[in-house]
Image (cartoon, rainbow, N blue to C red):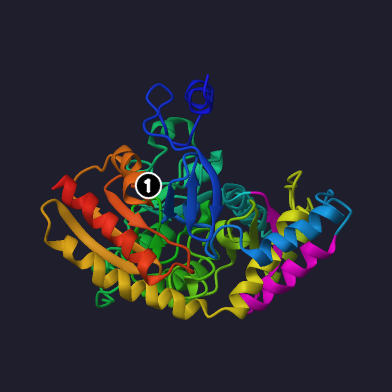
């Protein structure tokens, strides 16, 4: 049995039918923006391996930090113990984050960071004497991960977890903000969709612990870019009702939208912020939930006294070392110019797709390029063409998109946009 035959027979891949897994490529190496298949063929990782490898694969500084840490201490429990990598990463995060976000809870994946944020919000409300505030509000089109509570705040109809609706906690879903990122803002609550939030808070704030959403960019929920002012107004409303605001920046954090964090587009500081993916530059899994001193202090003063969560690999030293090295790259490299150049080039090179039959929209924000189709896109088509085009794309739903590493060259990016346009042309 060959490796690929074994894989097809025994291994489960994400969102893949085990009976018909479709085209599969055996990758033997990764370096910079390139992936190498077993036959030596190379293809550009236009996905940044699910949006995390912002500095490219096997970045020398990150690899060196991990190797040094591996020689010293790969792991130690974080209960009752601490270590320099966790402290250094914490220092760097606090320097990068807006003032006020300065209490960090490390975890081992983005979904778990969401679970921690939801638990923090409930514990905070209980400490406030609001024991009935156990539910959450969110907007349709959102995606927050695959773990149990996180699934409950994903879109219940068009999201990936609709089949579990009867088993999940019932949450409050608001209309998706319907003013796009580049449209003119309107304060009309019916037009911008905020009237629904205001009505929900007036009627049921005593049941709601927090509002959770992806700021500005909805990722796996459809690659939709909405107006930053919606966040400002929603934040104001929530503050008036003591409803915590939770931003999920697992996909958008660390420069992907052109700003260091998507929250900077709106100049809003949430009560809780979830980070992951690019936190380690895509070299090893790590996530963080960051909150404010008032929230942390209230939990500390509560009856329980402690945050009721503690992953085995919390603050894993190897991952923290990678994270510190990754964040250091954001300070020594002009990533803002890199992302701005990527955005300008994608805007120009994806534009021809607008004229193709079946194309609903073409949009770019930072290092995110999207061609939205009117109908469903079969990802296996792009997978099957990857070795031929030399570009690894993984479309989903109606979107053919890319999130390339920031270090991608203009020529490499042109190969990516050409592959995307060619894929659309083949579907037209």
Q: Position of residue 19 (x, y in %)?
A: 40, 21
Whether residue 41 sits left or right of residue 295 in the image: it is left
Image point (19%, 44%), residue name: 375
Q: Position of residue 393 (x, y in %)?
A: 37, 50
Q: Is residue 295 visible?
A: no
Q: Nearer the viewer, residue 335 or 201?
A: 335
Q: Which residues are magenta?
A: 83-108
Q: Nearer the viewer, residue 421 or 272?
A: 421
**Quadrant of the image occupied by residue 371:** bottom left
Image point (61%, 48%), residue name: 112
Q: Position of residue 237 (x, y in %)?
A: 45, 69
Q: Is residue 296 visible?
A: yes
Q: Is residue 235 magenta?
A: no
Q: Position of residue 178 (x, y in %)?
A: 27, 63
Image point (48%, 23%), residue name: 5
Whether residue 154 sits left or right of residue 427 in the image: it is right
Q: Is residue 389 above or below residue 11?
A: below
The extreme right residue here reads: 80
Residue that mark 1 sits on: 394
Q: Residues within 10 Å of mark 1 (few under 14, many from 20)?
A: many
**Quadrant of the image occupied by residue 87:** bottom right
């Amino acid at each position: 049995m060959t490796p690929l035959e074994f894989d097809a027979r025994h291994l489960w891949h994400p969102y893949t039918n085990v009976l018909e897994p479709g085209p599969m490529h055996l990758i033997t190496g990764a370096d910079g923006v390139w992936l190498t298949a077993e036959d030596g063929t190379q293809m550009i990782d236009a996905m940044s391996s699910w949006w995390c490898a912002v500095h490219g694969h096997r970045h020398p500084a990150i690899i060196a930090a991990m190797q040094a840490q591996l020689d010293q201490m790969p792991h130690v429990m974080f209960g009752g113990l601490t270590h320099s990598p966790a402290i250094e990463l914490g220092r760097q995060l606090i320097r990068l984050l807006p003032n006020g976000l300065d209490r960090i809870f490390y975890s081992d994946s983005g979904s778990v960071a969401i679970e921690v944020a939801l638990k923090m919000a409930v514990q905070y409300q209980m400490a406030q004497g609001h024991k009935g505030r156990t539910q959450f509000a969110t907007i349709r089109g959102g995606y927050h991960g695959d773990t149990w509570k996180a699934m409950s705040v994903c879109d219940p109809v068009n999201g990936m977890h609709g089949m579990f609706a009867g088993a999940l906690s019932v949450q409050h879903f608001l209309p998706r903000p319907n003013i796009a990122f580049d449209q003119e803002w309107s304060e009309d609550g019916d037009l911008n969709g905020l009237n629904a939030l205001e009505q929900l808070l007036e009627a049921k704030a005593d049941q709601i612990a927090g509002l959770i959403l992806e700021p500005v960019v909805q990722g796996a929920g459809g690659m939709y870019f909405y107006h930053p002012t919606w966040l400002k107004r929603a934040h104001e409303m929530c503050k008036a009702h003591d409803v915590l605001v939770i931003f999920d920046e697992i996909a958008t954090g660390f420069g992907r939208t052109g700003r260091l964090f998507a929250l900077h587009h709106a100049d809003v500081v949430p009560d809780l912020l979830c980070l992951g993916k690019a936190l380690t530059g895509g070299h090893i899994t790590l996530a963080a939930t960051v909150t404010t001193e008032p929230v942390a202090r209230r939990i500390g003063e509560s009856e329980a006294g402690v945050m009721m969560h503690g992953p085995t690999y919390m603050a894993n030293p190897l991952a923290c070392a990678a994270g510190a090295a990754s964040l250091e790259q954001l300070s020594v490299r002009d990533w803002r110019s890199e992302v701005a150049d990527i955005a300008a080039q994608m805007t120009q090179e994806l534009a021809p797709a607008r004229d193709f039959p079946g194309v609903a929209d073409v949009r770019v924000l930072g290092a995110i390029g999207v061609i939205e189709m009117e109908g469903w896109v079969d990802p296996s088509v792009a997978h099957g063409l990857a070795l031929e085009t030399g570009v690894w794309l993984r479309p989903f739903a109606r979107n053919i998109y890319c999130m390339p590493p920031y270090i991608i060259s203009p020529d490499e990016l042109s190969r990516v946009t050409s592959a995307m346009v060619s894929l659309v042309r083949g579907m037209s």
